[in-house]
Image (cartoon, grey):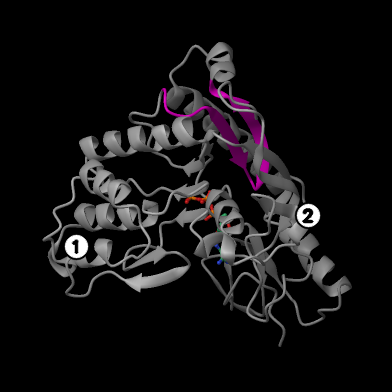
Amino acid sequence: MADKEHEAVPTVEINGLSFTYPGIDGHPPPGSKPLIDGFSLTINKGNRCLLVGSNGAGKTTILKILGGKHLVEPHMVRVLGRSAFHDTALTSSGDLSYLGGEWRREVAFAGFDVPIQMDVSAEKMILGVAGIDPQRRAELVKVLDIDLSWRMHRVSDGQRRRVQICMGLLKPFKVLLLDEITVDLDVLARADLLKFLRKECEGRGATIIYATHIFDGLEDWPSHIVYVAHGKLQLAMPMDKIKEMSKLSLMRTVESWLRKERDEERKRRKERKESGLPEFEKRVEGSRAAGDPACVAARPLNNGWAGGRLHSTIAGEENFFLSSNRVLRQ
Ligand SMILES: Nc1ncnc2c1ncn2[C@@H]1O[C@H](COP(=O)(O)OP(=O)(O)OP(=O)(O)O)[C@@H](O)[C@H]1O
């Protein structure tokens, strides 16, 4: 995805990515379909890429894989030409920064997780990070309107979030992965942060991938839109092409995609129900064929399949012993 101001220098390369969450035994459940499947995408230096999709589409999973938090084959994902999972220097150097939703109590900084609700001041946290350009630090404190005297255990969610975001942006990242981090921010803080992030891309060619459901103030922010459904890439396009294609606002455009996706899914489910042999029975057969004779039942769970011993039948609903997204062995 080339940007006007920058040469098309790929910073994020995803090549035929396939991924399944492991079960309790550390292996993908037998017969399970990959959650992310045949996913290929190239994002270039300077791109501000908005990652959209319905709940459960796979956005967080993709960002975590890019951030090196899940193991995939090294050739499938390259960030700045390196594998984030195998090359931990990518994150520890700050070149790759991941700011995700797991930050309720911790802040990930330079590859380390630091507790954020202890009795410590914002100043101590922010100034405690060594090797940071003081000008950049001051700018971030101003952009995020942080009061350095805040005590981290006595601030609001939004104030804590500002300190967390500041920590995550202190090092001048080359690639930034944002997973719905602006939920707690007020309108002003969010607008100022988006402006700062845009400047980082336009000024020094940083690449940002931002997954969100909140489209307020985003109309003119992204340079590209990537739409994911059921772990598959549906569309990756420059924002100006999207605007040519759809006369609707960005939010209404995405809404129309998700509505279409939901309607198709409902239709598929209805057809499956009417087709006589329910999908889960096919999965049971598949699991047995794959060498799991103990599997007596299976049903969809979290985009995968769970199976186990039939426990009881309650109000006509089959009730299984299910503990995880895997086929149980007994
Ligand atoms: N640790 C896990 N083990 C098994 N399945 C998981 C795990 N984490 C997520 N999933 C499943 O993977 C699918 C994709 O989840 P993911 O969190 O990537 O979606 P998302 O697009 O970020 O959704 P949302 O918009 O709701 O945040 C979901 O069906 C989810 O249930």
Q: Quadrant of residue 32?
A: bottom right
Image check: 272 left or right of 171? right
The crowding category of the residue bearing disc 2, from other C-alpha atoms within 10 Å (few below 14, some 14 to 19, many at least 20), is: few
Q: Which mark is residue 304?
A: none
The answer for how far apart the CA atoms under marks 1 and 2 are is: 62 Å
Amino acid beneath label 1? Glu
Residue for badge 1: 123
Can you tell me whether the CB of the residue at mark 2 lies under 8 Å from the nearest atom of ligand 1? no
Image check: 316 left or right of 8? left
Look at the numbered discs 1 and 2 and tell me whether their residues touch, using CB distance below 8 Å: no
Residue for badge 2: 277
Magenta span includes 222: yes
| Percent position of residue 171, x then y | 41, 54
Q: Quadrant of the C terminus?
A: bottom right
Magenta span includes 92: no
Residue stretch in magenta: 220-239
Q: Nearer the viewer, residue 40 or 235?
A: 40
